[in-house]
Structures are given as structure tokens and as C-alpha cells.
Image (cartoon, rainbow, N blue to C red):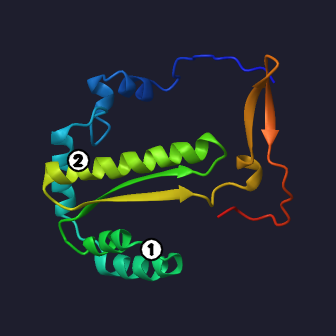
């Protein structure tokens, strides 16, 4: 396999205009490309005017986490969702081999840190939520990586039989 790094201009004018920060494209989006303190305060204000089925969500999450011996911190955070002022920061990652797990850990830490920062800034409970996108692919998509060997890139896969055609969870 040969890999070449190729850069190509975006064909979509709205996307390229948004990325370059042009005002015309920004008018199509609720928030600017660059997020700042005012952006988050504006979003919090919008969310505070909405109602969410908090009790149903908390009940479901508490029941679900019984199966996993969830930590006291997890249970405490779930219960914090009952506070009508609370909001969440959501992020996730598709499972993968090698840098996939490391990247996922980095993202988890980033989400937790960002939630803490926003909680201090906004003065409301901000809860980190992380999900693993494990249902949108199969084992063949995540069982390999590419390595450099004798100046060439080679695919290396985990040699494991997979008997059932079902998503990895």
C-alpha cells in the first residue's frame, strides 16, 4: 500500500466559507466557528428556557448502570441531572485498535476538563457525558492498523475468528 498526503480545496462553498470565518457563511449557523465565553452563556440561556424529561432519563441511567457496578461519582453525576439548571457536555468516539483507545481516553479527559471549566464559568452543574460508538461498525472495521515495514506501509490485523455477523458492543 502506498500513502500520499493530498490536500484539496473544499468544493462546498458554505463549508469553506465557514471554515475561513466569513460572515456570510456564519449567518447559516447558530454559533460562530470560534467558541468563547459569550457563546457558552448564550447556549446556556437558550437551554434554560426548555424543559427536558430529567426524571425519566435519570431513572433509566440508574437502572442501566446497575449492570456495570458504576462508581459513586457516576451515580452522583447521574443524580445531578435532576437539577433543572444542569447541562451536559457530550462527546464520543468510535472504538478502534491502538490509537483508537488512547485517543478515546484523551477525549474522555478533555470532556471532563471542559465540563469542569464550564461549570466554574457558568455557575451551573455541567456534567460530562461520553459514549463509545460501538454499534455503527463491525469487527473488520476496527481489527487492524497500518505499520511502516521496510519503507512500505502494511496492514496488520488481529487474527481472530468472528463467528457471528453482529455489531461489536
Q: Earlier in the sequence, mark 1 or mark 2?
A: 1
Q: Residue at x 64, y 47 (%)?
A: 96
Foreground: 40 or 145? Answer: 145
Marks 1 and 2, how far apart at CA: 24 Å
Q: Position of residue 161 (x, y in %)?
A: 86, 58
Secondary structure of the residue carrying numbered label 2: helix
Residue under pointer 1: 70
The residue shown at (15%, 55%) is: 45
Is residue 154 found left or right of 7 in the rendered image? Answer: right
Quarter of the figure that contains the N terminus: top right
Q: Name above or below for residue 9 compared with residue 29.
A: above
Residue tagged 2: 117
State the image quarter where residue 44 is shown: bottom left
User: Split into 4 quadrants, where in the image is the C terminus?
Assistant: bottom right
Label 1 environment density (alpha carbons within 10 Å; few <14, some 14–19, many ≥20)? few
Residue 42, position as x, y percentages in the image: 17, 48
Amino acid at each position: 500500500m502506498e500513502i500520499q498526503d493530498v490536500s484539496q480545496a473544499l468544493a462546498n462553498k458554505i463549508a469553506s466559507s465557514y471554515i475561513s470565518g466569513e460572515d456570510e457563511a456564519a449567518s447559516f449557523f447558530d454559533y460562530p466557528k470560534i467558541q468563547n465565553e459569550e457563546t457558552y452563556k448564550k447556549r446556556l440561556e437558550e437551554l434554560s428556557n426548555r424543559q427536558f424529561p430529567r426524571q425519566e432519563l435519570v431513572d433509566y441511567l440508574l437502572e442501566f448502570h446497575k449492570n456495570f457496578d458504576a462508581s459513586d461519582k457516576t451515580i452522583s453525576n447521574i443524580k445531578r441531572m435532576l437539577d433543572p439548571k444542569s447541562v451536559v457536555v457530550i462527546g464520543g468516539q468510535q472504538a478502534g485498535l491502538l490509537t483508537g483507545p488512547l485517543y478515546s481516553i484523551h477525549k474522555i479527559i478533555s470532556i471532563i476538563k471542559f465540563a469542569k471549566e464550564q461549570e466554574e464559568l457558568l455557575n451551573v452543574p455541567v456534567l460530562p457525558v461520553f459514549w463509545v460508538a460501538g454499534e455503527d461498525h463491525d469487527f473488520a472495521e476496527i481489527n487492524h492498523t497500518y505499520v511502516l515495514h521496510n519503507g512500505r506501509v502494511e496492514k496488520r490485523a488481529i487474527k481472530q475468528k468472528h463467528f457471528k455477523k453482529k455489531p461489536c458492543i
